[in-house]
Image (cartoon, rainbow, N blue to C red):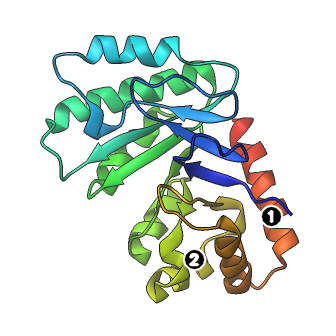
Amino acid sequence: MDFFDFHHHKENKELGIYNLDYGKTPPQHLYSIGIHPQDIQEENIENQFNWLNSNITENCFAIGECGLDGLIEVDQKTQGDVFKKQIELSNELKKPLIIHCVRKFYEVISFKKYAHQAMIIHGFNKKQSIADDLLKNNFYLSFGKPVLYNLSLQNILKTIPLDKIFLETDNEDFNIEELYLKVSELKEISLENLNKQIVENLETIQNG
């Protein structure tokens, strides 16, 4: 059985969504492209968007990573402007958004009103109340390696509806099958049914 990796940084891995780093060239398989908050160059934003727009091919599945980060020096207003512009691009292209968020979850929720496409928080690893608020606002949550050992996160995952879940390796080096096995155990469903549900979720977000 093959397992889809919703968000990864391995250029030669084909089954999943490869996160294209800023300035790089798109691969021949599925990828996401965006301006990560940490990559924002405040004097060069126009050129950054030129790069983004000129590297959207038929293999582009999503816009992102994009979002808000409360731990970096980039001005928060600038981050918000760049994020909103990428939301507008996702609306125009009818592509979902892969969201990077650090300590800015309620601000990200406030941007949801601009989005016509699905918004997926990648690498979710926060508390139950944040998960609940995101779900109330129709976000999807993508989970990574911490699920294998973080008991609190495992308990949260048990409460998340199956039709709102994705699984990813991000930049961790491990076999994603381990994560699928753990989640199938936590959700008390077969590996096959979990895999089928993830594929259905992908089709849902792809079709808007």
User: Please, what secondary structure does the residue beneath circle 1 have?
Assistant: helix
Residue at position x 64%, y 41% in the image: 12
Residue 174: quadrant of the picture: bottom right
Quarter of the figure with the C terminus: top right
What amino acid is found at the position of numbered circle 1 in the picture? Answer: Asn
Residue at 67% x, 75% y is 178
Asked if residue 184 is positioned above or below residue 173 in the image, the reply reads below
Q: Report how many numbered discs are placed on residues in the image.
A: 2
Query: Quarter holding the N terminus?
Result: bottom right
Q: Is residue 59 visible?
A: yes
Of callouts 2 and 1, the N-terminal one: 2
For disc 1, the neighbor class at 10 Å (few under 14, some 14 to 19, many from 20) is: some
| x and y, in percent, of residue 66 in the image | 40, 38
- Please name the amino acid that badge 2 sits on: Leu
Q: Which residue is mark 2?
A: 157
Q: Is residue 135 left or right of residue 104?
A: right
- Sort mark 2 into few (<14), some (14-19) or many (20+) by Cα contacts within 10 Å: many
Q: CA distance from mark 2 to mark 1?
A: 16 Å
Q: Is residue 206 left or right of residue 170?
A: right
Q: Which mark is residue 163?
A: none
**Whole-percent x and y of residue 156?**
52, 79
Q: Which residue is mark 1?
A: 195
* Residue 109 appears anywhere in the view: no
Residue 86 rendering spot, x and y as whole percentages? 43, 27
The x and y percentages for residue 131 are: 46, 68
